[in-house]
Amino acid sequence: MLILASQSTARRAMLDAADVPFTVVAAHIDESAIRGSLHAEGTTARDIADALAEAKAMRVGARRPESMVLGSDQILETAEGDMLSKPQTPDDAIRQLEALSGKPHRLWSAAVIVEGGRPIWRHVEKAVMHVRPLGSAFVRDYVDKHWETIGYTVGCYEIEGPGAQLFSQIEGSYFAVLGMPLLPLLGFLRERELMPT
C-alpha cells in the first residue's frame, strides 16, 4: 500500500476521490529551512518543489523501506520570480493577495515516490494562475471570511471553493493547482499494479 508523507487535506482528498489505497504518515521536515537553503543557492522554484517532495518521501521512507512512499509539495512563484510561503497572519494574506492582484503567477506541484530508500518516480507540473485585479475591500472581506481555511494555503486560496473568485484564467491541470500532479501519479501506480488497469 502507498504511504502519503503529507498532512495535506487536499492531497488526501485527491487520493481518496481517485480510489487510491493509501495510509498517511507525516514527514515532519523543516520545509522553510530547506526552501531557504536551496533558494540561497539559486535553485529554481521548480527544483525546490521537487526537492521538498523528495525530502518528505525520503524521511518517511527511511522508517518504512518496505513501502512505496509518496512525497508532494508545491511552490508559488510570482511574476517577478519571488517565492511565496504560507501566510502567517491575516495581514500577511492581505499583502500576498494584493501583490498577486492583476498578475499571473506559477504554481509548481511536485510528487516523488521513494521505495527501498531511493526515489523511483518523480513528476513536476506547472499551472499558471491569472489573478484578476482585486479591489481592496474584496480582499479584506475575502480574508476575514475565509482565513480559517486559506491560512494553510500558499497564495491564500482554495480553488475548489471561494478562491475561484480570485482568477480570470487558469492554465494547467486542476490537480496541480490543488497541490499534486495526480494523473501522472495514477499512471505510475497502474504500471506498478497498485491500481486497476
Image (cartoon, rainbow, N blue to C red):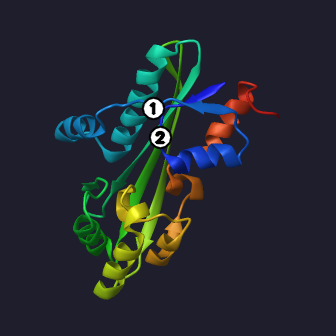
- How far apart, in angstroms, are the residues tagged by discs 1 and 2? 6 Å
**Tag 2: Cα neighbours inside 10 Å, few (<14), some, or many (≥20)?**
few
Residue 96 picture location, percent across and down: 27, 67
Disc 2 target residue = 7
**In front: 42, or 21?**
21
- Three-letter code for the amino acid on which mark 1 is drawn: Ala
**In front: 175, or 145?**
145
Residue plotted at (47% across, 52% down): 126
Residue plotted at (59% across, 18% down): 67
* Residue 27 located left or right of residue 69: left
Residue 79 picture location, percent across and down: 30, 64
From this view, report whether residue 70 is shown above or below residue 12.
above
Disc 1 target residue = 26
Residue closest to the far left = 40
Residue 144 picture location, percent across and down: 35, 75
Do the numbered discs 1 and 2 sit on residues whose CB atoms are within 8 Å?
Answer: yes
Dot 1 or dot 2: first in sequence order is 2
